[in-house]
């Protein structure tokens, strides 16, 4: 996780680093809570839906990483 936090803080300006740090810290906790609840719900009603929803979420996240950033932040050198 340290590499994710470092990469996220370098991707934004100094004024947004606090917000990004909070988001990076909150997302895994939300996944630990919401993942089993939603997966159990989907598995109970239609078993293949749990696996396919995980695949769909991974594909969406992967597609979002392929988009170019609108406003890249350049570090001063």
Image (spheres, rainbow, N blue to C red):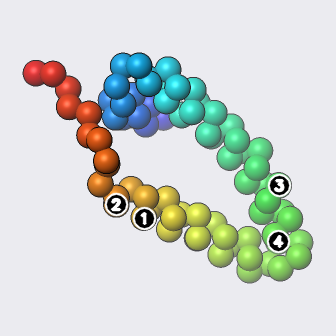
Whether residue 6 is visible, yes or no, is no
Camera-nearest label, 4 or 1:
1
Residue pointed to by mark 3: 37
Residue pointed to by mark 1: 63
Residue pointed to by mark 2: 66
The disc, 4 or 1, on the residue closer to the chain's N-terminal end is 4
Q: Where 35 sits versus 15, above or below?
A: below
Residue with the most extreme front position: 70
Instruction: Determine crowd level at label 3: few under 14, some 14-19, many 20+ residues with C-alpha closer than 10 A.
Output: few
The disc, 4 or 3, on the residue closer to the chain's N-terminal end is 3
- Do labels 4 and 1 touch, CB within 8 Å? no
Q: Answer left or right for 71 relative to 63.
A: left
Residue pointed to by mark 4: 43
Residue 16, numbered circle: none
- Do labels 2 and 1 touch, CB within 8 Å? yes
Percent coordinates x, y for residue 39 in the rendering? 77, 63
Indicate the secondary structure of the residue bearing disc 1.
helix
Q: Mark 3 to mark 2: distance in Å?
A: 29 Å
Instruction: Determine crowd level at label 1: few under 14, some 14-19, many 20+ residues with C-alpha closer than 10 A.
Output: few
Indicate the secondary structure of the residue bearing disc 2.
helix
Indicate the secondary structure of the residue bearing disc 4.
helix
């Amino acid at each position: 996780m340290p590499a994710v936090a470092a990469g996220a803080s370098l991707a934004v300006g100094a004024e947004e680093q606090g917000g990004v740090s909070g988001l990076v810290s909150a997302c895994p906790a939300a996944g630990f809570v919401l993942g089993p609840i939603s997966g159990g719900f989907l598995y109970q009603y239609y078993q293949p839906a749990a696996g396919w929803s995980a695949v769909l979420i991974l594909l969406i996240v992967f597609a979002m990483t392929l988009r170019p950033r609108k406003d890249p932040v350049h570090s001063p050198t």
